[in-house]
Amino acid sequence: MATVICIANQKGGIGKTTTATSIATILSDKGYKTLLIDSDLQGNSTDTYRASFEGVATLYDILLEENPADINDTIQHTEMGDIIASDPLLREADSKLSTKGIAGYKILKKALSHLMGYDFVIIDTAPTINMVLRNVLTASDYVVIPITADRYGFQGLFELNASIKDAQELNEKLKIAGILLVRYNNRTILAREVRDTLISEAHNIGTELFRTSIRECNKVKEAQTVQSTLLKYDKSCTASKDYIALVDELLKEIM
């Protein structure tokens, strides 16, 4: 059974996709069979992996079709890695899944129980708490919460934690692996203050701040421009090195 790690924070624009694709790439480079699932209808991970959502089975076909697709038949094998693509039609999820009661929260978990041949599943999520995210949390073993080192980075943290606690009623295994500081610049007083505050805030929600922080790096945007994962674009840049250190830390936590 694959270990499922989701990358979640309801605040947008804080590097969830870069974090998800980087973790997936590094795990794959380490020899782990790794699948990325894009659950954000904006499809940024799908775009990064150069995957398609037209004319192929996507996450929509798993979550919302009356006769769900076999999860193994929805996987696209791309140059960047293996992925289940997002789909703009996921916008229908709340209206369709909310009528199913508890069963509407467990569809992805049930699908993943049939997944074959993978060690890890990494799930990129949307910046909103909706039925797709609730499915993801119910299906996951761990949550990584990226946060930027600014005063707005805390927005949504406690609401997300409340959603995690709700999901734990259906999924006892679910645990916050840690809070991850991204786009971090330790030369600014504000960033250092935010880091100190996050250490105590992490304890308040029963987790830790990862020792590894992801430094600000222009290569992140350059990689996005050419539709590449950061590690495949430039493995030697500061952010890539930080993500490699993060995965080492994460593996020690969950193995």
Image (cartoon, rainbow, N blue to C red):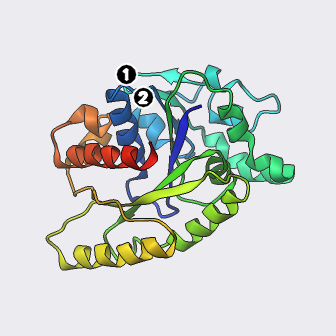
Q: Nearer the viewer, mark 2 or mark 1?
A: 1
Secondary structure, mark 2, is loop
Which residue corresponds to the image point at 34% horizontal and 60% vertical from the top-left? 210
Q: Is residue 56 visible?
A: no
- The residue at 20%/50% (across/down) is 218
- The reply to whether residue 94 is in sight is yes
Dot 1 alpha-carbon crowd within 10 angstroms: few under 14, some 14 to 19, many 20 or more: few
> Residue 4: x, y in percent?
54, 41
Q: Could you tell me residue 159's position as x and y percent? A: 58, 71
Residue named by callout 1: 79
Quarter of the view holding residue 214: bottom left
- Identify the residue shown where x is 27% and y is 60%: 183
- What percent of the width, then of the height, locates residue 141? 57, 47
Q: Is residue 103 above or below residue 195?
A: above
Q: Secondary structure at mark 1?
A: loop
Q: Which mark is residue 50?
A: 2
Position of 63 with respect to 35 (left or right) is right
Query: What's the amino acid at mark 1?
Result: Glu
Quick check: 205 above or below 123? below
Q: Are marks 2 and 1 in contact (CB under 8 Å)?
A: yes
Horizontally, residue 233 falls left or right of residue 10, namely left
Q: Quadrant of the N terminus?
A: top right
Q: Amino acid at mark 2?
A: Arg
